[in-house]
Image (tube, helix red, strand yellow):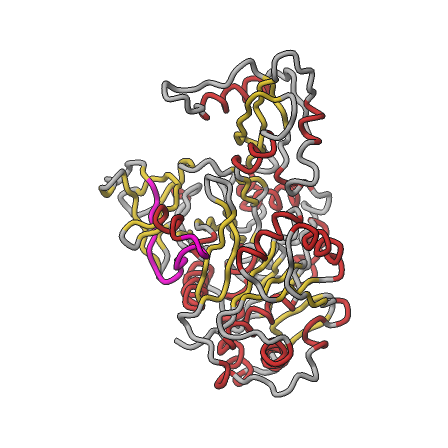
Amino acid sequence: MTSIDHWIEAHARFTPNRPALVFGGATLTYGDMAGAIGRVAAWLRHTRGVRHGDRVAYLGLNAPDQLLLLFAAARIGAVLVPLNWRLAPPELAHAVTDSGASLVIHQPAFAATFSQMAAVAAMPPAHLCDPATGGLSTSTADSLPVVAGATGGGRASDPLLIVYTSGTTGRPKGAVLTQKALETNALNAVHMQEITATDTILTVLPMFHVGGLNIQTTPALYTGARVILHDRFTPATTLAAIRDERPDLTVLVPATLSAMIAHPDWERTDLSSLRAVATGSSDVPHMLMRAFIRRGVPVLQVYGATETGPVAIYQRRGDSEEEFGAIGRAGLHTRARIMVGDRRAEPGEIGEIELRGGNITTGYWNRPDADADTFRDGWFRTGDLALADEGGVFWFKDRLKNVIISGGENIYPAELERVLGEIEGLKEAAVVGVADLRWGESPVAVVVREDQALISAETVLKGFDGHLARYKHPKSVVFVEALPRNALGKIQLDKVRKMAEDVLGNDSEKQRA
């Protein structure tokens, strides 16, 4: 296998005039895209001094620039670090410094954010790219000499993406995905969704996540399909695009499914072009999936993580009604097993999902400690609980880790608990996820006041301002007399969650954000 930029070069040879990317009313053909990748690769190497193995960070909404950077980085063996623009400046600064990025490319809308990042830690040089004026495709038009695929030096084994996620400690860590991992993931995704060169894909989820980038977008470019790219999701523009552009496939998480169903245009929008909608990232509410199924649109669940590409376990069209609610079968190029301790689970027995395949991360950037905790004899330990039935169908049950998934975003309680620990008037605190019809889950802070403290829920919530991204903030604060602990003094989170559910259900003292 060669570097993945050869996907685009091959399509440019066979079908140079076929549309590759549609964005903001403009279209890049595969021929256009191949040329732009060569220019961006030349600009990175010759103008910005990026070499094999160097990291380049991207901060911006969805735009062709991110995909051009991905394939240009692949060509020269560099590594792209997509930044989650929803994070607070200190969180973004950590990703840049931890990855050792030598360049940050950002859109004009994030210039102030970059300045705030620089106030937190020393930042590398930055380059402004404006999608409104053509972005990197235009600004690198005079780059010479163009770096051709044959002279680029990128290899299948090269790291290509460092995507930041967090573990149970809440410390962000960068999952490393190689070029081989992206190609293996693409093969799984093509098999899952039967993607062909004649398809049109609608991408509305953010590509700083592997869900938005790799469930359909890069697999579509692997096959030579057409990708319609939105800078961000809104229900109105997504429904209008389905009506007018007639896409074959799109990916939606529970929060976006819910927003579309609730929109006034939902019932009157013609969805008949959609062959399927892919969804995942959390335990998807059945009522959301059934709303699409009632409109004649199959819903395919996909299971995975940042570390798995993410496409690892999935459903396909035609899976039986009896499998509704399952997460599917192990992917074409991925092995999956359920482990109970050190043994394989029996069919129907709940245990931890472990995965192995070419799509799996090679490890975490500069975190051998995390690698040791995450891998068992070459198998990736997901920390998620499921069972597999006699037919090899996997059924998700719960999360072994404490991660909260809200609207498709990972929220890690330890991060919130550290902020709570700095708020005066609080004695102790724990953060748990509670069921939320719209977001899947929402974080709730369960706190104990210091003796005589009069701190309010509003004050607690304000304590998160400027420290964490807004979507991570607790949606509610519940005051209790004490947190339940076991004999070893460890907080019993299942009991804390029950306390939160009881109080919120009874509409006791709480504050919704």
Q: Is residue 276 shown to the viewer in this render?
A: no
Q: Is residue 458 left or right of residue 317?
A: right
Quadrant occupied by the C terminus: top right
Considering depth in this image, is 58 or 346 the residue closer to the camera? 58
In the image, is residue 358 part of the stretch drawn in magenta?
yes
Dividing the picture into quadrants, the one containing residue 427 is top right
Residue 101 drawn at (x, y percent): 57, 63
Q: Is residue 189 left or right of residue 269?
A: left
Residue placed furthest toward the bottom: 145
Q: Is residue 365 shown to the viewer in this render?
A: yes
Quadrant occupied by the N terminus: bottom left
Residue 34 drawn at (x, y percent): 58, 80
Considering depth in this image, is 76 or 404 the residue closer to the camera? 76
Residue placed furthest toward the top: 452
> Which stretch did the figure color magenta?
352-367
In the image, is residue 508 part of the stretch drawn in magenta?
no
Dividing the picture into quadrants, the one containing residue 394 is top left
Residue 365 drawn at (x, y percent): 46, 57
191 over 442 or under it: above or below: below
Q: Is residue 373 left or right of residue 106?
A: left
Considering depth in this image, is 218 or 271 the residue closer to the camera? 218
311 over 25 or under it: above or below: above
Q: In the image, what residue occupies the spot 68% across and 32% down?
A: 463
Q: In the image, what residue occupies the spot 67% across and 59% down?
A: 60
241 over 127 or under it: above or below: above
Q: In the image, what residue occupies the spot 52% across and 56% down?
A: 163
Number of numbered discs on residues: 0
